[in-house]
């Protein structure tokens, strides 16, 4: 099973980082308000970054690494990827 780390931009411009084995399902859950307490009140959310990882452990480690980044570092990382939709 492959996992990926993702970054969402919320309606409030906050960034949320997580990992999953099914990005489409997880994004739908965030937008329904059933995925996390943080994004529930900040919907809709937009996927701005995703990165494939080889295993769940690697995804968890990468998620922790991204969460330690500053907002500016996260935005720069997202801009370097094609999936970016930052304004």
Image (cartoon, rainbow, N blue to C red):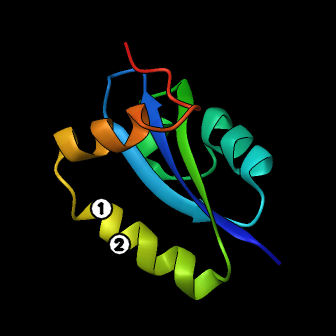
Judge left or right: residue 24 versus residue 78.
right
Label 2 CA crowd tier, 10 Å (few <14, some 14–19, many 20+)? some
Q: Do the residues labelled 1 and 2 touch (CB within 8 Å)?
A: yes
Q: How many labels does the image show?
A: 2
- What residue is drawn where x is 64% and y is 48%? 34
* Of 44 and 69, the residue lying toward us: 69
Residue at disc 1, secondary structure: helix
Label 1 CA crowd tier, 10 Å (few <14, some 14–19, many 20+)? some
Q: To which quarter of the image does residue 52 belong?
A: bottom right
70 lies above or below 55? above
| Residue 70 spot, x, y in % from top left | 16, 50
Residue located farthest toward the right when viewing the structure as drawn: 1
| Residue 62 spot, x, y in % from top left | 44, 72
Residue at disc 2, secondary structure: helix
- Measure how far apart labels 1 and 2 are at the Cα level: 5 Å
- What residue is drawn where x is 22% and y is 65%? 68
- What residue is drawn where x is 63% and y is 33%? 31
Residue named by callout 2: 64
Residue named by callout 1: 67
């Amino acid at each position: 099973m492959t996992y990926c780390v993702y970054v969402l931009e919320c309606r409030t411009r906050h960034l949320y980082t997580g990992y999953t084995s099914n990005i489409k399902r997880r994004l739908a859950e965030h937008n329904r308000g059933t995925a996390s307490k943080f994004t529930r009140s900040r919907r809709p959310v937009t996927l701005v970054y995703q990165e494939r990882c080889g295993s769940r452990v690697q995804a968890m480690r990468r998620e922790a690494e991204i969460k330690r980044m500053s907002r500016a570092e996260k935005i720069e990382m997202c801009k370097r990827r094609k999936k970016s939709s930052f304004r």
